[in-house]
């Protein structure tokens, strides 16, 4: 494995046959025993989880009858834990930059950082925003009623935590992965400056993944706790527990050898909790990992929650394979099946007995499938997302925008109660599903007054999701 968080040449497997794992889905448990424990609310072991997510290791493939039993158990658990409400948040994405040279093989969001340098002649589709541009994006969205700005960005080599961090970094040391801002056509400034810029007009700032926190303390003696405390002072409110992918290092060595390892991801999350920052946690599955890796990942998250109690929701993210290096190289030929997606949601609900909320991603799954997953153990349906780049660049087809009226219509149609929420779930508003759709808008945001979330005239933001499944 390369130095975590440092630059990589992007080398990796060129064929699925190159990959051999030590962790395999093989247990001495039976499906029937594991299901009985799940139904009775007994804490599951990894072996139990493997039996449930595979519908039994005693046979190849997914057994449709057993799968339905797992989904039923998860849906009952969901009803017992959170009832029939389905939540969402009014939010906007503001990704600051696509510049990155970490070389993750599952990602097509980033653009190789050298393309952004002043002496690079070729055009590219990437972007870097100044703090002023970030502030303008967020301020516009706050005026339109959003509660939260979500920001997850590439690891731009000119980024530093603050000016002192930049001064301490040595551009001549490759382990620092640093180049001064004058080398680039646009200066991203510092993490502190970007957070301060986005922390405008009372909006909730949800940003700085463990990977970004590592980038913000590379090359110096500062630890994750210092980083998150500094960012909290700058206006950071909660953190997204992304960059998790699969929290088993033998998988990370294949798909993201330049990223932090499992131990560092956990350390960053614990530091965020120590700094008083609530957090989410994610899994990105459906690529090179197997069922045992997925359950081992759930065990890492559950153990972290046992120690911190700080995770507000778990977010399963199904791998979008198109337009990614893993697909281009023939390492993967597709993503997770519908049955695997259903079982991932269901086993997340059953295994994570200490995490209250599980999300279904309409951006990843589309409307029909995303709604179906709400009957497999999920109870949250993401957010309005006025702009989304990461999934779209990987080949996602399910749109960039969801109105409050859309939520009211869709969730009421499946017999569930739509609820607008705050990022950390401490504020909730039940929607009036009988209200006229053109009168439904967010109310929890700092400037929200119920006006529908619609683009201003002349805006190029999508007004509705696109894609065959929608």
Image (cartoon, grey):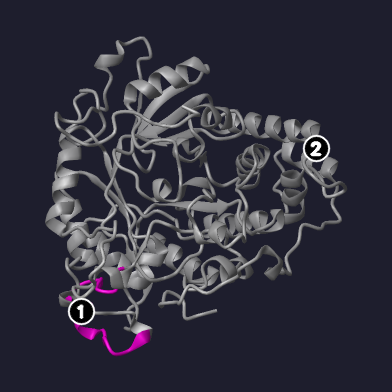
Q: Is residue 29 left or right of residue 441?
A: right
Q: CA distance from mark 2 to mark 1?
A: 56 Å
Which residue is tagged 2? 63
Residue 292 in percent (x, y) is at 71, 57
**Which segment is the magenta one?**
156-174
Along the horizontal axis of the image, is 53 left or right of 335?
right
Q: Considering only vertical position in the picture, is 455 above or below 133?
A: above
Magenta span: chief secondary structure: loop
Q: Quadrant of residue 38?
A: top right
Q: Nearer the viewer, residue 160 or 129?
A: 129
Q: Secondary structure at mark 1?
A: loop
Q: Position of residue 29 (x, y in %)?
A: 84, 52
Q: Nearer the viewer, residue 348 or 354?
A: 348
Residue 105 horizontal/vertical position (percent): 51, 64
Q: Would you place residue 428 above or below residue 126 in this image?
A: above
Residue 234: name its quadrant. bottom left
Closer to us: 468 or 80: 468
Q: Is residue 467 left or right of residue 53?
A: left
Give the residue displayed 47% in from the left and 71% down from the top.
260
Crowd band around label 2 with a 10 angstrom C-alpha radius: few (<14), some (14–19), many (20+) = few
Q: Residues within 10 Å of mark 1 (few under 14, many from 20)?
A: some
Residue at far front of view: 122
Disc ID at residue 180: 1
């Amino acid at each position: 494995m390369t130095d975590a968080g440092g630059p990589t040449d992007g080398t990796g497997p060129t064929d699925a046959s190159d990959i051999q794992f030590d962790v395999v889905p093989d247990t001495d448990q039976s499906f029937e025993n594991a299901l009985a424990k799940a139904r009775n609310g007994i804490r599951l072991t990894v072996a139990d989880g493997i039996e449930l997510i595979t519908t039994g290791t005693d046979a190849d493939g997914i057994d449709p009858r057993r799968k339905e039993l797992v989904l039923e158990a998860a849906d009952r658990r969901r009803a017992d834990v959170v009832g029939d409400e389905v939540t969402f948040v009014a939010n906007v994405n503001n990704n600051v930059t696509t510049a990155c040279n970490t070389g993750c093989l599952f990602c097509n969001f980033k653009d190789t950082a050298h393309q952004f340098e002043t002496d690079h002649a070729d055009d590219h589709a990437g972007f870097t925003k100044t703090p002023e541009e970030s502030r303008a994006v967020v301020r516009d969205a706050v005026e339109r009623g959003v509660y939260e700005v979500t920001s997850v960005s590439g690891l731009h080599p000119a980024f530093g935590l603050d000016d002192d961090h930049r001064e301490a970094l040595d551009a001549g040391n490759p382990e620092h992965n640093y180049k001064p801002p004058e080398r680039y056509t646009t200066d991203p400034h510092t993490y502190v400056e970007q957070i301060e810029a986005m922390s405008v007009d009372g909006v909730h700032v949800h940003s700085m993944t463990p990977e970004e926190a590592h980038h913000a303390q590379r090359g110096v003696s500062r630890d994750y706790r210092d980083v998150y405390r500094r960012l909290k002072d700058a206006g950071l409110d909660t953190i997204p527990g992304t960059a998790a992918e699969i929290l088993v290092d033998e998988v990370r060595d294949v798909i993201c050898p330049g990223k932090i390892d499992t131990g560092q991801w956990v350390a960053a999350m614990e530091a965020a909790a120590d700094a008083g920052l609530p957090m989410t946690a994610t899994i990105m599955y459906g690529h090179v990992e197997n069922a045992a890796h997925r359950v081992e990942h759930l065990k890492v998250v559950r153990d972290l929650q046992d120690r911190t109690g700080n995770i507000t929701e778990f977010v399963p993210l199904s791998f979008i394979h198109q337009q990614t290096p893993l697909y281009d190289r023939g390492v993967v030929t597709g993503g997770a099946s519908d049955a695997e997606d259903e079982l991932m949601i269901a086993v997340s609900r059953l295994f994570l007995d200490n995490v209250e909320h599980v999300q279904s991603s309409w951006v990843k799954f589309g409307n029909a499938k995303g709604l179906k997953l709400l009957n497999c153990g999920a109870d949250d349906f993401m957010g309005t997302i006025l702009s989304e780049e990461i999934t779209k660049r990987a080949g996602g087809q399910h749109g960039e925008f969801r109105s409050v009226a859309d939520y009211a219509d869709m969730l009421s149609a499946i017999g569930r109660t739509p609820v607008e929420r705050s990022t950390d779930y401490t504020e909730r508003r039940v929607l009036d599903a009988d209200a006229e759709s053109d009168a439904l808008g967010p109310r929890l945001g700092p400037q929200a007054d119920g006006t529908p979330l619609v683009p201003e005239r002349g805006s190029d933001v999508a007004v509705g999701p696109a894609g065959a499944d929608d």
